Image (cartoon, rainbow, N blue to C red):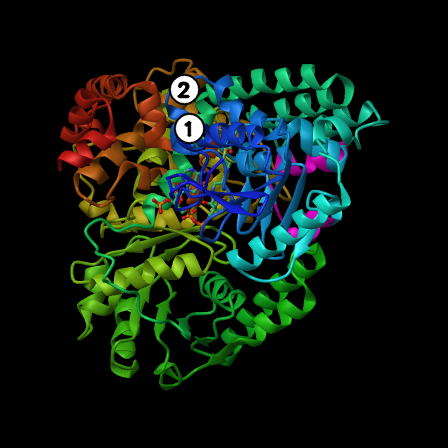
Amino acid sequence: MNETAPQVPLHFRRQGDIAVLIIDNPPVNALSQALRKAISETMALTDADPSIKAVILIGSGSTFIAGADIREFNLKLPAPAGRAAYDSVDASKKLTVAAIHGNALGGGLETALCCHYRVALRSARVGLPEVLLGLLPGAGGTQRLPRIVGAAEGLELITSGAHIDAPKAATLGIIDEIVPGEDFDALLQGALAFTRQALAQGKPLRQVRATLSKLAGTDPALFQEFRNKNARKWTGLIAPQKIVDCIEMAATRSWDEGYAFELARFLECKESPQRAALSHVFFAEREAAKIPGLGREIKPLPVASVAIIGAGTMGGGIAMAFANKGIPVKQLEMSAEALQRGRGIMQKNYDTSVSRGSLSKDKADAALARITGTLDYQDLAQADLVIEAVFEDMAVKQEVFRKLDAVMKPGAILATNTSYLDIDQIAAVTQRPESVLGLHFFSPANVMKLLEVVRGARSAPQTLATGMSLAKRLGKIAVLAGNCDGFIGNRILANYAREAEFLLEEGATPWQVDEALKGFGLPMGIFLMRDMAGLDIGWRVRQRKEATRPKHLRHTTLPDRICEMGRFGQKTGAGYYQYQGREASPDPAIEQLIIEYSAKAGITRKPVSNEEIVRRILTAMVYEGAKILEEGIASRASDIDVTYVYGYGFPRYRGGPMFWAEQQGLAQVRDWVLEYHRVHGDHWKPVRLLDEAAAAGSWKAVERSR
Ligand code: CAA
């Protein structure tokens, strides 16, 4: 076998009697069909060449193989052929060594597990994260990994999809040796040294499937116990259950039976709508980070220090989000008492994290020490970014921005954390509207992943780029939103909450609506959520907007009736539900109120099925989503999905509301809208973009043509 000229996606190099196979499929060396073919062919050549004694598999650039090429799962490829590459490595007649840096994930780790030995840099990470994509490892991962780490550890690792670092992997026996150094060259040198020594010592061709088994003696009860323990967590999910079945097979049957069983389960997962939904979310969240039309030459501004106005729930959470990432924060309040109260709450939150073991005491203390309070705007002047998180009132916010404009250094970014107010009206009181944007955090801001970055009419591209890059630094997912009442998330929420209220008038109860939504996979129904948030704020907003409410549209005053009874939700012990502490239960008084309300409004109550509840509410979300797309408030339908998955607990395995609509068929959703328009009036006025998308069969098609 001769050295070959570099050929994508696999290069071959000789080092004496060792063949070095360099996988070269940027950016993450994903196992595409072409790469798998190249691996099989090259392994056949190394097998046939008597001058080659060993083969090293290594990834070019900064990583081993990050897994199968996820994009190819939507193609109809012959699946068993997909295993040929792995089988060729497993059956190699030459000693094989995987040299791992960066990530060995999914099919990447499975390839490494087919090798006889594995070495890694200390910084490398390995894992089988297929479950997060609605899949299971389909190339022997569920059979080989537990043979190395045992059933209990295998169950945890594969059903969680956790990435673990090389030292832990070495402790578990996944990695045979950690080699010194930081980069590709160091790894290759280490792997060559390991391989030469293995050859010199006459180490055996150690096939994981044949020679290793920590599965012997596994307690057969373990699997059912594991299923029971996780039953709630896995509600609605297909892949984790099947993973347990596969590992149980590995522990109880022959290799051939287990390997075939795994493939069959893999194919079931691969064809499931959950797999399609979860891969959609994977790419959607990466796409959301890119602002259409914003060139790579627009670099974010450096943010080394942050100021926050307000130490309430939002201000405190935002301060913690920055401090947790090592960024110093100055927090301004109106009084020393308010500062102290805010600090007390942050301290309590950190104490909870420490007592739960999610944060060490040292890290919690260091984070809190990064947050300092002040009463003086002048103290904020040198911060690179200031975020206002005061009461949701335009006049109050404008006053804060006037002061900020006066003191902040030139070039500083001025952000508002408003959840629905007009960014342009806020920017208008400053001399630097180009530096103003919305950064809408979700509560609790130190926990929730979503950040809506709201673009004002005059926000500069660099201001927006800074907002987006900041999200990544904070470990959050950013979605760019245009300026409108409620932006993307809360605008859609208002629409679907309205339909939920109408459903009460028409025949449903709050607990039935909530149960239907939970059945769909939402963590909590809309009425329970409203009770938790408090009903009085919405009541006040409705009172304020009453004069300007379009009178020709269907309207309900049912929520006002509930507030008039002094029922403001959980905090008053009653809202849509009645409460014993935090325990909600259906309240006959509310059911009676709703029945009387319907009668007075002249609405004949009829049974509403859970299916109809879900369809109506989801269609209301999609309808508003289509309007939001048409107006350019969201750049892509998938951005709306990301907003709902990360900000509102929309079940990830359903892909988001807009993805759900595509799965129903956009023409079908359009027909439901037409029907709702006929029955319920102009809240459902047809949207042109939805018609176009229905005709084209996808959101992408209409996004592209705009
Ligand atoms: N297939 C295709 N593209 C992939 C990919 C994959 N497995 N993994 C990452 N990419 C792409 C991303 O979409 C992104 O593309 P763009 O730049 O065009 O947006 C690019 O690679 C870089 O990815 P990230 O932005 O995520 O980079 P990161 O450095 O933050 O993270 C990573 C790197 C940890 C590898 C992360 O990308 C990741 O977790 N990838 C998925 C890993 C995975 O789930 N592997 C299992 C796949 S399923 C499987 O393997 C089953 C099987 O064989 C039978």
Tell me whether the residue at label 2 lies in contact with that at label 1, contact meaning CB atoms closer than 8 angstroms.
Answer: yes
Determine the quadrant in which ligand 1 lies: top left
Lateral position of residue 380 relative to residue 13, left or right: left
Q: Is residue 39 left or right of residue 309?
A: right
Q: Nearer the viewer, residue 524 or 528?
A: 524
Closer to us: 236 or 516: 236
Number of marks in the rendered image: 2
Coordinates of residue 605 in the picture (x, y in percent): 38, 16
Q: Which residues are magenta?
A: 151-170
Work out whether mark 2 precedes mark 1 in sequence or the reverse, and give the earlier one: 1
Which mark, by number, is residue 679? none
SS under mark 2: loop
Q: Residue at x 53, y 69 (%)?
A: 342
Q: Decide whether residue 168 is among the magenta residues.
A: yes
**Which of the two marks, 2 or 1, is nearer to us in this view?**
1
Q: Amino acid at mark 2?
A: Leu
- Circle 1 SS class: helix
Which residue type does callout 1 highlight? Answer: Gln
Q: Which mark is residue 77?
A: 2
Query: Going 24% across and 69% down the picture, which residue do you hit?
Result: 435
Q: Position of residue 483 (x, y in %)?
A: 22, 52
- Horizontally, is 475 left or right of 297 in the view? right
Task: Indicate yes or no whether the magenta region holds residue 11.
Answer: no
Foreground of the two, 46 or 271: 46
Residue 495 seen in this snapshot: yes
Q: Position of residue 448 (x, y in %)?
A: 48, 51
Residue 33: assigned label: 1
